[in-house]
Image (cartoon, rainbow, N blue to C red):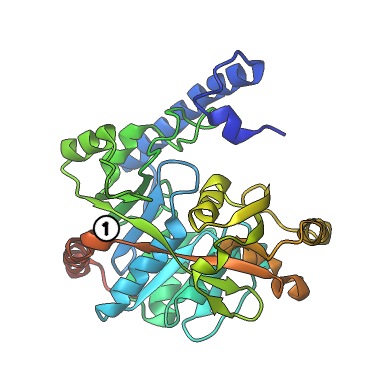
Amino acid sequence: MIDWPRMWSDDARRFSPIRMVLCLASLAYGRVTAVRNTLYDRGWFPSVRLPRPVVSIGNITVGGTGKTPCVILIARRLQAHGLRPAVISRGYGGKSALPVNVVSNGKEILLTAAAAGDEPLLIARSLPGVCVLTGPKRALTGRAAVEQFGADVILCDDAFQHRQIQRDINLVLLDDHRPLGNGWLLPRGELREHPAGLARADAFLLTRAEPTRPPDADILAIAQKFRLPVFRCIHRTVSLQNAGSGEKRPPEALRGKKVCAFCGIAKPDSFRDALFALGAEVVSFNPFPDHHAFSLRDLDDLQRVFQMRKADYLVTTEKDAMRLEHCPEVLNMVWTLHIQMDLSDSAPAFDQWLLDRITAAAAQAPQAG
């Protein structure tokens, strides 16, 4: 198995036959994505207009920029302003073959992570009053959100490269520390498309921003070139929560405690860094592939290490906890970090910008039916 983080690292500069093959594959991938975007830009590939404003929340790199907490943040802010947002997602990792899957009708959770995918389930649990739907064709899920649930804004999760539906607002999330990855396209690097594609964005959200650290100069140059606003977000750990009982403790409860941690996310180092920042003594750390389906053997091994190290906490991410439902006895052992995205000082300006764009889009949107 290829160690992708190491292969994508700028420090891995030794000659490698695999890396050479990946460089050639990146060139081919770049050509394919460029042709695809051109066909959409010229209208040769069809793009469907939904009857309500569509806000796309996506990125230009592979995972780890905080799309899920951003979707939750924006949905809550829209709710606070009296709107009825709905979230539509492809439902990566979900096994349901139906064209439209209702994860939540806004009142109750209707599907499991196995059927819907871990991220849609986490979004649904975090957003009472918001319907969450998944399916391979977002034109279908978007129309269902409007016609069945009365949504007046569609939040399209992870959709910057999904161009089969038109969007009124393209929000692009960029990691403040590594906005363009290592600069290479997939599979040699983390870029999903050439940075020139950022011209389709309407705003940048710099995630995991540090107040004392200036934004990346290249990103600011792109934003200035296309006259795009840039908003900065931070990630805050607000609580430590038991995955089974729901008991909450302050995140400071981890300070000085022995912690066994595991996760299956795109950037596991960010999770480990969050534990260190809270003062935890991480005695074991087990990263798994992104969206990993934990087997009973995996969980037995984790419990064995937890007991052997005589640790105080067995900790994972909220997203990973969604994939532990098949083992309720483990859920009661596991604690999660409840992390929220916060716009901080950017909140008033972001709200005004977003609401203005949605109001303008709603005035031009075609009527449902």
Q: Residue at x 45, y 81 (%)?
A: 128
User: Are there few (<14), some (14-19), or many (20+) residues within 10 Å of tag 1?
Assistant: many
Q: Secondary structure at mark 1?
A: loop
Residue 197 location, x and y as percent? 33, 37
Question: Residue at (29%, 42%) from the top-left corner?
Answer: 213
Q: Can you see residue 42?
A: no
Q: Is residue 304 left or right of residue 233?
A: right
Front residue (pair 160, 100)? 160
- Residue 75 in the image: above or below residue 170: below
Which amino acid, by three-letter code, is at mark 1?
Asp
> Could you say where residue 54 lies in the image, as x and y percent from the top left?
32, 63
The quadrant where residue 76 appears = bottom left
Quadrant location of the N terminus in the rendered image: top right
Q: Quadrant of residue 363?
A: bottom left
Closer-to-camera residue (366/75) = 75
Residue at 63% x, 16% y: name it: 16
Q: Outermost residue toward the front?
A: 256
- The tally of labels here is 1
What residue sits right under mark 1 in the picture? 168
Residue 170: x, y in percent?
A: 30, 53
